Amino acid sequence: MFYVDVEGHKDSEEMKCAMDELVKITKHLKVLGCYPIDNVKPVIPDLTDKKD
């Protein structure tokens, strides 16, 4: 068993092709999640603000 984390739209031709190929070579395939990226903004914490 292994996990794969990919970035791509689930409806894109490339992703559909990749999933079709995985289905051919695996006994079991499960998609654990699909998350929108357009509304996700990375957050970098400010580690210099130390409060005593």
Image (spheres, rainbow, N blue to C red):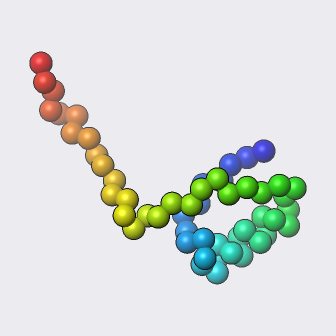
Query: Quarter of the image holding residue 20?
Result: bottom right
Q: Up-down: is 52 above or below 3?
A: above
Q: Residue at x 61, y 76 (%)?
A: 11
Q: Residue furthest top?
A: 52
Q: Which of 33 and 8 is in front in this view?
A: 33
Q: Spot the residue most to the left.
A: 52
Q: Which residue is drawn at 60% across and 78% down?
A: 12
- The quadrant in which residue 37 appears is bottom left
* Residue 37, placed above or below residue 11: above
Question: In front: 34, or 44?
Answer: 34
Q: In this view, does 50 lie to the left or right of 4?
A: left
- Say how many tags the image has: 0
Query: Percent x, y for residue 29?
Result: 77, 57
Q: Where is residue 36 in the image (x, y as percent from the top left)?
A: 47, 64
Q: Is residue 18 toward the left or the right of residue 35 in the image?
A: right
Residue drawn at x 37%, y 64% is: 39
